[in-house]
Image: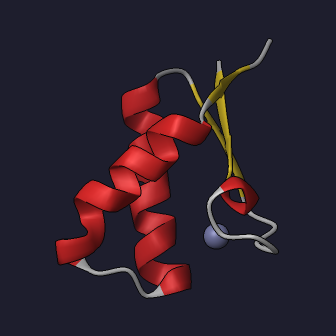
Amino acid sequence: MKEFDCADVVPGCGASFRAPTSGELIAHGRLHALHTHGKAEPDMPAVDVAVRAAIRDVG
Ligand SMILES: [Zn+2]
């Protein structure tokens, strides 16, 4: 299982996501960034890089 805390990218954000694969986790991160932080399409590569860097393996 993979875990991503949005606070690692956006300090103060309490959102946390878990998914079986990095790809699914990045998809969650994209939706969250879009809906919660107003990040639109042009920023997506940067979002992907930030999310990928913050992903941790969890039990
Ligand atoms: Zn967030």
Looking at the image, which is closer to me, 12 or 17?
A: 12
Q: Position of residue 31 (x, y in %)?
A: 42, 65
Q: Is residue 43 left or right of residue 51?
A: left
Quarter containing the N terminus: top right
Count every numbered label the image shows and give the total: 0
Residue 8: quarter of image: bottom right
Q: Position of residue 43 (x, y in %)?
A: 27, 71
Residue at 24% x, 56% y is: 45
- In the displayed orientation, state which residue is furthest to the left: 42
Looking at the image, which is closer to me, 22 or 42?
A: 42
Q: Is residue 2 left or right of residue 37?
A: right
Residue at 47% x, 71% y is: 33
Residue at 28% x, 81% y is: 40
Q: From the viewer's perspective, is residue 25 above or below residue 7?
A: above
Q: Position of residue 35 (x, y in %)?
A: 47, 81
- In the displayed orientation, state which residue is furthest to the bottom: 38
Looking at the image, which is closer to me, 37 or 9?
A: 9
Looking at the image, which is closer to me, 57 or 1?
A: 57
Q: Position of residue 28 (x, y in %)?
A: 47, 52
Q: From the viewer's perspective, is residue 12 above or below residue 7?
A: below
Colour mapping:
secondary structure
Q: From the viewer's perspective, is residue 33 above or below residue 48?
A: below
Q: Is residue 48 left or right of residue 52?
A: left
Residue 59: quarter of image: top right
